[in-house]
Amino acid sequence: MDYQKRLKELRIQNGYTQEQIAFILHTRQEQYSKYESGKRELPVKHLIALCCLYRVSADHILGIEKFVKK
């Protein structure tokens, strides 16, 4: 799964709209929509904020946790 799809999944699971997430990230809804659709790359500062908001790791959002040796 691409991280864009995971962003949308997490947002919906947590009951947020794109507009609400954009407000939290101090950006516009149109900009956030581009992150979810893959039209723009998610800045690291937004990745960190979303990790804190959803209480998940960056590995989880980026989908790389399956590649990390335990």
Image: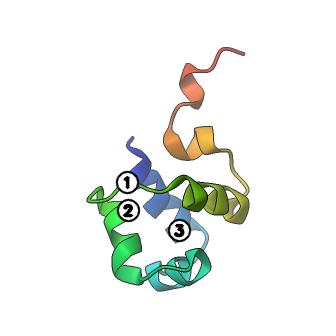
Q: Nearer the viewer, mark 2 or mark 3?
A: 2
Q: Name the residue carrying label 3.
A: 11
Q: Quadrant of residue 29?
A: bottom left
Give the residue displayed 37% in from the left and 54% down from the top.
41
Callout 2–callout 1 Cβ contact below 8 Å: yes
Of 30 and 67, the residue lying toward us = 30
Residues under labels 2 and 3: Cα distance? Answer: 12 Å
Q: Position of residue 23 (x, y in %)?
A: 55, 84
Q: Mark 3, residues whose alpha carbon is within 10 Å: few (<14), some, or many (≥20)?
A: some
Q: Position of residue 10 (x, y in %)?
A: 55, 61
Residues under labels 2 and 1: Cα distance? Answer: 6 Å
Q: Earlier in the sequence, mark 2 or mark 1?
A: 2
Q: Name the residue carrying label 1.
A: 41
Tell me the element at label 2.
Answer: helix
Q: Mark 1, residues whose alpha carbon is within 10 Å: few (<14), some, or many (≥20)?
A: few
Q: Position of residue 27 (x, y in %)?
A: 48, 79
Q: Name the residue carrying label 2.
A: 35
Residue type, label 2: Tyr
Q: The N terminus lies in which quarter of the figure? A: top left
Give the residue displayed 30% in from the left and 55% down from the top.
38
Residue type, label 1: Glu
Does 2 sit above or below residue 6? above
Q: Position of residue 58 (x, y in %)?
A: 62, 44
